Amino acid sequence: MKKYNTEQIRNVALISHGGAGKTSLTEAMLYTSGAINRLGSVDAGNTTTDYDPDEIKRQVTIGTSLAPVEWAGAKLNLLDTPGFFDFTVDVKSALRVADSAVVVVCAVSGVEGGTEKIWQYAEELELPRIVFINKVNRENANFDAVLEQLRRFFGLKVFPLQFPLGEEDKLRGVVDLVKMKTLVYQDEGGLTFQEEDIPPDLADKAEELREKLVEAAAETDDDLMEKYLEELSLSDEEINKALRTGILSGQIVPVLCGAATRNLGIQPLMNLMASALPSPQDRPPMEGEIPGQDEGKTSRKADPAEPFSALVFKTLADPYVGRVNFFKVCSGSFKSDSQVYNASRDKMERIGSLFFMRGKNQIQVEEIPAGDIGAVAKLSVTITGDTLCDKNSPVVFPFIDFPETVISFAVWPKSKGDEEKVSAGLARFIEEDPTFKVERNTETKELIISGMGDTHLDVIVDRLAKKFGVEVELTTPKVPHRETIKGSQSKEGKYKKQSGGRGQYGHVYMSLEPMPRGEGFLFVDKIVGGVVPRQYIPAVEKGVVEAMEEGPVAGYRVVDVKATLYDGSYHTVDSSEMAFKIAAAMAFRGAMEASEPVLLEPIMDVEVTVPENYMGDIMGDLNSRRGRIQGMVPGEGLQTIKAQVPLAEMFNYTIDLRSMTQGRGMFTMRHSHYEEVPFQEAEKVIAAAKAKKESE
C-alpha cells in the first residue's frame, strides 16, 4: 500500500440497522478496488471483515473491522460496524474516530429502529453522511418508498443522486441524476458499466428529481443561487462542487443505490466518497485537556506538523497474540520502534511494529500520518479510550459516555476449580469492551456479568470457551432481598454452658424497633450499674450484626432496625466475649421473629424512551410488572416514561422492550430504594428459600 497524506484520507464508518448489508458493501468495495480478488459473502462465511468465528457462526458483525481501500487517489478507511443493538460500543467507538458515515438502508425493510439510532449518533457528532440504499435487486425492493421514508424521518435534506434502472431481479444499473445518464452494468461481477441515454419512460422522473437536486445544490452557495435564479440550471461541475460543500456542512445527505452482493452501484459510491466526503483536515480539531491542569483545555489539528497524539478506539484481547490496540492519529505522526506517553494512565509505552488492518490481515508500516487509522500490538497498559501522545506536549481526549448495561446474568463455571480462569478471562474482555461489566455480589455470592443484551453476553460466553478454554453457564441473578420489622418487641438471650472446667455465661435483654427505610442499623447501649460489664458491650453489638446477616423470613440480610441493650447479667468467672455474642444473637433472633418481620425487595428507577405510538403498550407492560408510572417527558417524536419497578420484574426487560418496539425503544435503570414485597410475591420467595435450605 502506497503512502497517503492527511488530505487524501477518508475515514468512513459504515453504519446501519442489522442485516442491511454493511459487510457485503465493504466486501464489494474491497473487490472493486482490487484489494481482494474474489467477492466473499456473509452466507459463505468468507468475507474479509467478518472473520471472527462468532461472526461466521451467527452471520452478523460483532466488532468493528477496519478495511482500507485505495480508490481515485484517496485512501478510504472503511469501518465496518455492527448493526445489532447489543454491540453499540463498537458503533460509537467507530463514529468517534470517523470523519463521515455511509448509512446503509435495506431497499426492502427501509428505515428501521437501528437506522434511527445510528442516525442520531451521527447527528450528535455532526458527521457528514451518504445514504446507500442496498439490496435493490431483492424481491419486494422499493427504492421510491424507502426514499420517501428517509425524507420523512430525517428531513428534506435527503436527496437522491441516483435511482435504480430496473426492478428486483431485473436490476441492470442506475440512473445518474448529475450526468443525466444511465450506468448499465455489462458483466455479472459488476466491474464494468456503460453510460447510455435515459430511457424515455424514465425521463420525466429523472428531470423532476434532478431539478430538486439542482435546487438543493444552489442553496449551498449564494453565487450559485444567483446563477440558478437567472439561468434555472447549473453545470455538472458546479453541482459536484456544491454537493461536497453541502455534504460537509450537513445541508445535503445524498442517496445512492445498488446491490452489494451483485457488486452493482459500487463505483459511483466510491467515487463520491473519494471526492465529496471530508478528509481529517476538513473536520474540526480534536478538543482535549492538558493532564494535571484543572482548566487546561487544548486542541489538536490533523496536521503532521503538530505534536503527536492518538486516540485508542478499540482493543482486542487475544491469549496468544496479546492486546491489539486500534487508534486514530489525531495530530503529528506515529512512528514504529519509538516510545509514546499514555496520558490517560501517566505511563510510557514502548512501540514496536505499527500496521494497518484489513480484516484480520496486518499490513506493516513504518509511520502513520495525522488523520490515518492503524493498530499496534503488545502495549502494556493501554486500553480502549486512552490517549497516546508526545510526553512534552501531553493531552487527554474525552472518549464516549457509553450507555449503562441493560441485562445481567450470574455466571457459573461448569467444572469445579475453574473460578480463577473464569475471572481472568472475563477481565480480558473488560479491556476490549467498555459496555461489559463484571462484579462479585457478596450478598448473593454470585459472579454477575452485565452487558447490552443477551446476544452480547452469549458471545462473551462463547469466546470464554474458545479463547480461554473454560465453559460456563448463565442463570438469572438472585434478587438481593432484605428483611426488616414492622413492630417492636423485647427478648431475653441467655447462654449458659457448663462442661467440667470453666463454663460459658452470657445474659442480655434486648429490644428491637423499626427504623425509617434506608437508615440501616443502630445499636444503643442503655446498660446502667454494670449489669453487663463494659468490656462485653462490643461483643453484644457484634453478635447482633452477625445475626442480621440471616433474617428469619427467608434468610436475607436484616436492615433498618434499632437494637437496644437495656439489661442483663454476668458471671465473674464464666462470662466471656463469645458467650455474650451468642446471647445477643439469641435475643436478636427472638425479638425479630416477634416483631412482624417482612421481606423487602429492591425498587429501580426506570426511564424508557420510545416513539409516541408505543406509549400505551409500554405503560401497560410496566404496570403488569408491578411498576408505578412517575411521569412522562416529551421529546421530538419520542416520549420518556419514568417509572419505579421491582428489580425482580426487570431481568429480561431489554429483550421484551426490543420486541414491543421493533428495536426503537431504549431504557436506563438504577437502584432507588427497598420496599415491602407484596404478600403473594413474598410467599414465592419464602417457599424458594425454604426449598433451597432443605435441599442443602
Image (cartoon, grey):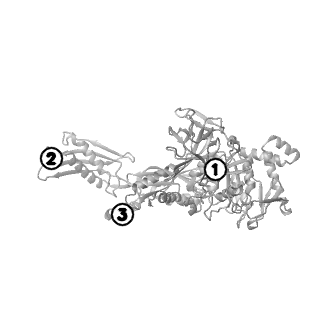
SS at badge 1: helix
Mark 2 secondary-structure assignment: loop
Task: Give coordinates of residue 220: x percent, y percent.
Answer: 77, 44
Disc 3: CA contacts within 10 A as few (<14), some (14-19) or many (>=20): few
Which residue has dot 3 on it? 687
Q: Is residue 136 above or below residue 131?
A: below
Q: Is residue 483 visible?
A: yes
Pointer 1: what residue? 120
Amino acid on which the number 1 mark rests in the picture: Gln
Hey, what amino acid is under mark 3? Ala
Decide which of 569, 313 is in the foreground and name it: 313
**Percent position (x, y) of residue 671?**
46, 50
What residue is shown with label 2?
Answer: 574
What residue is drawn where x is 13% and y is 48%?
502
Residue 479: image location, x then y, percent: 41, 56
Q: Alpha carbon of mark 2 to alpha carbon of mark 1: how far? A: 74 Å
Residue 116 quadrant:
bottom right
| Residue at the (55%, 60%) spot, across then down | 53
19 relative position to 670: left or right: right
